[in-house]
Amino acid sequence: MRKFHCLVTLCAGFVLSGCAGYRLGPTHGLAAGDKSVQVVPFANRTLEPRLGDAVTGALRKELQRDGSYRLATRGAGDLVVSGVITRYHRQEQSFVPEDVVSVRDYRVGLTAQVTAHEPATGRVVLDTSVTGYTLMRVDSDLTSSQRQALPLAATDLARQITALLADGSW
């Protein structure tokens, strides 16, 4: 019976020690929604149209979903995020088995130079290049397949930016 109690205590110690590094709530040390963030529309320096609007909208939705910051819709926020989409790229991932020249899947990527600063102090808290990806299956029409994939790549890019803002050590 004593061995059983020792075994239960030892197992409970292992289980509870696994939670030792877990933090409940936002990881940047502030209460959720304590600070607000303003998203300035992203500029598009690629030849692909409508990327700036897609990334800006996806970032706003992702920030609302995450909840670490409130979205400032009127006036400047505690943090202002802006960016420039610098690269749109497509890379072949797989080919049609019967025809090694025809592409079946592409990996679509969007790269943006993202900057976040505090308007009150002027301190730049984030200035980095971020890339978001998605896979695109080519149907009969490459243009319509690409049109469907771009919002997914924009959402992945927005997730990467949100993670940097929410989990940043700045």
Image (cartoon, rainbow, N blue to C red):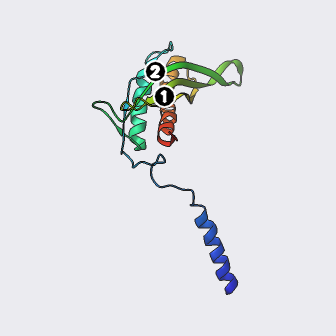
Q: Which of marks 2 and 1 is nearer the N terminus?
A: 2
* Residue on which disc 2 sits: 51
Nearer to the camera, 154 or 127: 127
Direction left: furthest residue: 74
The quadrant holding residue 42 is top left
Which residue type carries mark 1?
Ala
Image-based side of 162 in relation to 139, left or right: left
Total numbered badges shown on the rendered structure:
2
Residues at marks 2 and 1 touching, judged by CB atoms closer than 8 Å: yes
Give neighbour class at mark 1: few <14, some 14-19, many 20+ (Cα, 10 Å): many
Q: Where is residue 144 in the image (x, y as percent from the top left)?
A: 49, 20
Taking the view exactly as shown, the residue that stands out farthest to the top is 47
Tell me the crowding category of disc 2: few under 14, some 14 to 19, or many 20 or more residues within 10 angstroms, Cα based: many
Q: Which of 123 and 117 is in front in this view?
A: 123
Front residue of 153 and 79: 79
- Residue at the spot 54% in from the left edge and 24% down from the top edge: 110
Spatial CA distance of label 2 from label 1 is: 8 Å
Identify the residue shown where x is 60% and y is 61%: 18
Residue that badge 1 annotates: 154
User: Observer-nearest residue: 76 or 65?
Assistant: 76
Locate residue 20, reporting x and y percent. 57, 60
Please give the name of the residue rendered at 67% of the width and 82% of the height, measured from the top-left corner. Answer: 4
- Secondary structure beneath disc 2? helix
Looking at the figure, which quarter contains the N terminus?
A: bottom right
Identify whether 63 is placed above or below 113: below
Residue 73 placement: quadrant = top left
**Disc 2 residue type (three-letter):** Leu
* Dot 1: element: helix
Task: Locate residue 163, reporting x and y percent.
Answer: 50, 39
Q: Where is residue 37 in the image (x, y as percent from the top left)?
A: 37, 35
